[in-house]
Image (spheres, rainbow, N blue to C red):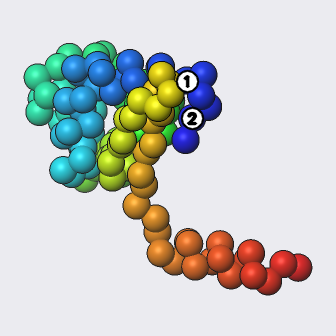
């Protein structure tokens, strides 16, 4: 989760209509920037700006794939399952829930139980 001083920026990011469209598209399946531009009816520069913004707050991940012609390209996918925004004591709280990778979680627990 990002530091408290960036909560406002996270809310601004989630509040951005284009960022929400990009997130909605990649929550269903990974997309390249070109596919996102077509799916979301946005210009490629707009897509790249939103990808950069979403990546800044660790809301997306990317993978590099190789096309049939040998060129490399990235596909983007959502890096969380849900977000809860609450107002407590006149202060906004943002909680991002991520799907944990079970083998990674087991390794982490094992390491914690068996310190060297």
Instruction: Identify the disc placed on residue 2.
Output: 2
> Is 5 above or below relative to 60?
above
Residue 39 in which image quadrant: top left
Residue that extends furthest to the front in the rendered view of this protein: 89
Which quadrant holds the C terminus? bottom right
> Which residue is depicted at the point 65% across and 72% down?
108
Residue 54 in which image quadrant: top left
Instruction: Identify the disc placed on residue 47.
Output: none
Q: How far across and how far down the image is residue 19, in percent?
A: 28, 26
Residue, disc 1: 6
Q: Is residue 12 visible?
A: yes
- Left or right? Give the position of 37 relative to 80: left
Badge 2 element: loop
Q: How far across and how far down the image is residue 104, in percent?
A: 55, 72
Q: Residues within 10 Å of mark 1 (few under 14, many from 20)?
A: few
Q: Residue 65 or 61: which is nearer the viewer?
A: 61
* For the residues bearing labels 1 and 2, Cβ distance under 8 angstroms: yes
> Which residue is depicted at the point 33% across and 52% down?
81
């Amino acid at each position: 989760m990002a530091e408290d001083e960036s909560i406002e920026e996270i809310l601004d990011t989630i509040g951005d209509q284009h960022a929400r469209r990009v997130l909605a598209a990649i929550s269903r399946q990974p997309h390249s920037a070109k596919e996102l531009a077509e799916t979301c009816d946005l210009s490629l520069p707009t897509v790249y700006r939103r990808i950069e913004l979403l990546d800044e707050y660790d809301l997306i991940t990317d993978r590099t794939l190789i096309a049939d012609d040998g060129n490399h390209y990235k596909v983007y996918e959502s890096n969380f399952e849900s977000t809860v925004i609450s107002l407590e004591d006149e202060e906004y709280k943002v909680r991002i829930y991520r799907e944990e990778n079970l083998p990674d979680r087991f390794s982490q627990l094992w390491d914690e139980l068996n310190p060297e």
